[in-house]
Image (cartoon, rainbow, N blue to C red):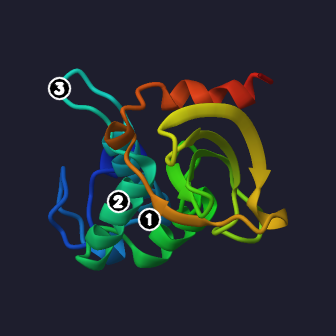
Amino acid sequence: MATGVGRHHRERLDRKGCPEKVAADKQSVFVRMSSVCDVYDAITSNRPYKAGWDPAESIRRMAVWSNEGHFDPRVFQAFVKSIGIYPTGSLVKLQSSRLAVVVEQHESSALTPLVKAFFSTKSNMHIIPEMIDLSKSNERIVSRELPEDWKISNLDEIWTEVARGN
């Protein structure tokens, strides 16, 4: 029986995981949870051999994999609910044509996180950063964006400045 999270966190519900290809009904909920977390960490982290994927793109791809039997659907949905549709650190475009980075999730609405707007797509220039609570604003997210498409290389610094109080 798969009880050891450390040993079995790479098991999959479709029995294509490792090390033992444990059947889904033998995997503990803790193993199923660690599987989702392990994959998210692996694909969003920068490694010497690859750049990490954008958080929102990672969730999109993991949703496809979940539908293919890679993850427990209930565990995956709980994971998405906890980190949001636009995970912290995601680059989004607002209806005002500004780019913003997601800073914090809203407790009751995955579509209205706290964001930090910092770039105008109309003028193609950085602007004075502005914190916007989308749950209290008429502003809304219109799309997820890739930092490289806008030549933004310091996205991590932009959103982590908030955590440090800058």
Name above or below for residue 31 compared with residue 127.
below
Which circle marks residue 28 in the picture?
Answer: 1
Which residue is disc 3 drawn over?
49
| Number of the front mark, 3 or 2 | 3
Label 3 to label 2, Cα distance in Å? 31 Å
Quarter occupied by the N terminus = bottom left
Which residue is disc 2 drawn over?
2
Quarter occupied by the C terminus = top right
Amino acid tagged 1: Ser
Is residue 148 visible from the viewing direction of this image? yes
Going by the picture, which residue comes out furthest to the right?
136
Amino acid tagged 2: Ala
Residue at x 64% of width, y 33% of height: 127
Percent x, y for residue 98?
58, 49
Percent x, y for residue 29?
48, 66
Q: Earlier in the sequence, mark 1 or mark 2?
A: 2
Q: Earlier in the sequence, mark 1 or mark 3?
A: 1
Residue at x 14% of width, y 64% of height: 16
Q: Could you tell me which secondary element the residue under label 2 belongs to?
A: loop
Could you tell me if the residues under marks 3 and 2 are in contact, i.e. CB atoms within 8 Å?
no
Could you tell me if the residues under marks 1 and 2 are in contact, i.e. CB atoms within 8 Å?
yes
Label 1 to label 3, Cα distance in Å? 32 Å
Is residue 159 visible from the viewing direction of this image? no
